[in-house]
């Protein structure tokens, strides 16, 4: 867990922290070069209460290419 994740989760009530982590794990970054997908939580981010699609400029963990990665939500099937 990154510094920001630990800080946010320590400030929130336990139920909210659990919900924030669960929702963040549904958001995935997709590399435009190799199509590698990575959970935003695993990338060190937090997105709670967000909607729509967005982009982040970062390095791909797989191919190491630097560029824009699409951030989309893929809700888990319950």
Image (spheres, rainbow, N blue to C red):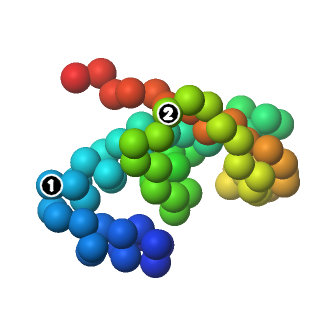
Query: Which residue is the site of mark 2?
Result: 51
Q: Nearer the viewer, residue 17 or 62?
A: 17
Query: Residue 15 has which mark?
Result: 1
Give residue 39's position: percent from left, percent from top.
50, 45
User: Is 13 situated left or right of 67 in this image?
Assistant: left
User: Quick one: label 1 or label 2, which is nearer the N terminus?
Assistant: 1
Q: Nearer the viewer, residue 20 or 76?
A: 20
Task: Tell me, yes or no, if residue 61 can be seen here.
Answer: yes
Going 71% across and 41% down the picture, which residue do you hit? 55
| Residue density around tag 2, few if under 14, some if 14–19, many if 20 or more, within 10 Å | few
Q: Secondary structure at mark 2?
A: loop
Query: Residue 7 has which mark?
Result: none
Up-down relation of residue 14 to residue 32 (above or below) = below
- Which quadrant: the N terminus? bottom left
Going 15% across and 55% down the picture, which residue do you hit? 15
| Residue density around tag 1, few if under 14, some if 14–19, many if 20 or more, within 10 Å | few
Up-down relation of residue 75 to residue 18 (above or below) = above
Q: Nearer the viewer, residue 66 or 56?
A: 56
Going 30% across and 45% down the picture, which residue do you hit? 22
Indicate the quadrant where residue 7 lies: bottom left
Q: CA separation, marks 1 and 2? A: 21 Å
Give residue 6's position: percent from left, percent from top.
36, 74
């Amino acid at each position: 867990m990154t510094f920001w994740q630990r800080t946010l989760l320590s400030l929130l009530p336990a139920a909210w922290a659990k919900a924030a982590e669960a929702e963040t794990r549904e958001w995935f970054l997709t590399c435009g070069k190799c199509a590698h997908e990575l959970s935003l939580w695993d990338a060190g981010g937090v997105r709670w209460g967000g909607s729509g699609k967005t982009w982040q400029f970062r390095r791909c963990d797989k191919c190491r290419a630097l560029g824009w990665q699409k951030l989309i939500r893929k809700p888990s099937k319950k």
